[in-house]
Amino acid sequence: MMSSLWSWRKFAAGLMLVGAVGCTKNCGKGHGALAPDQVVEAYLNVAMNMSEVAQRAELLEYTTGNLHEAIAAASDQVIQQAYISKRYKLENYSLIERRDRTPRETEVTFQIKYKDLTSVPGGSSENAVTVTTENTVRVIREKESWLISDVTGNKTSVEFPVLKDMEIKAAPAP
């Protein structure tokens, strides 16, 4: 369980970094009709737009295995911090790659780039640290639907802004 909780935390860290995005082309489709990458997109859409802890049930509809257990077992405070409290400004979000491993197992990689508003006093995005996180999730076919089961990879990079008075300026050519 410790391993699944760690994986969930890595996945949640990526999700905490995303701002609110409107409904995508997948809204209105039955869950069984969604392809693996569309399930990840639909999950992220729910996660990015959560306004109350009770919406955890919607997240659970898109998950199975370790991820499902970790979200179900998480305290309301953890769900609040991971999905509802917005301490970032979304720069961009995209699905990067889909790798079909078997007829019932696929990996989907997505990237999120955001400004960490907790990195500067007052929460101004201008001088905030830019974080880019890339997460890979395993999606498996279960009972006629694709479900996210595990986080299989997580890469994060942090870019610190250079203050104007610290910029290196090239000397004029002689």
Image (cartoon, rainbow, N blue to C red):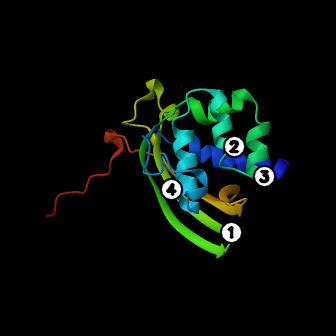
Image height of 141 relative to 41, above or below: below
Please tell me whether residue 49 is drawn above or below residue 94 in the rendered image.
above
Q: Which label's residue is closer to the chain start, 3 or 2?
A: 2
Q: Circle 4 — which element?
A: strand
Helix, strand, or loop for circle 2? helix
Badge 2 amino acid = Leu
Q: x, y percentage for residue 25?
A: 42, 51
Separation of marks 1 and 2 at Cα, in angstroms: 19 Å
Q: Tag 1: residue type? A: Glu
* Residue plotted at (66% across, 61% down): 139
Residue 28: x and y, percent?
49, 46
Judging by the rendered image, the residue that carries numbered circle 3 is 66
**Secondary structure under badge 3?**
helix
Judged by depth in the image, the label closer to the viewer, 2 or 4, is: 2
Disc 3 to disc 2, how far (Cα)? 11 Å
C-alpha separation, residue under disc 3 versus residue under disc 4:
22 Å
Residue located beneath label 1 in the image:
105
Residue beneath disc 4: 111
Residue of label 2: 60
Mark 3 or mark 4, earlier in chain:
3
Please report the residue visible at 46 percent of the width from the left and 37 percent of the height from the top: 20
Quadrant housing the C terminus:
bottom left
How far is disc 1 from disc 3 in space, using C-alphas? 15 Å
Left or right: 27 with respect to 52?
left
Give the mark nearest the N terminus, 1 or 3.
Answer: 3
What is the number of the mark on residue 67? none
Vertical arrangement, residue 144 with respect to residue 1, above or below: below
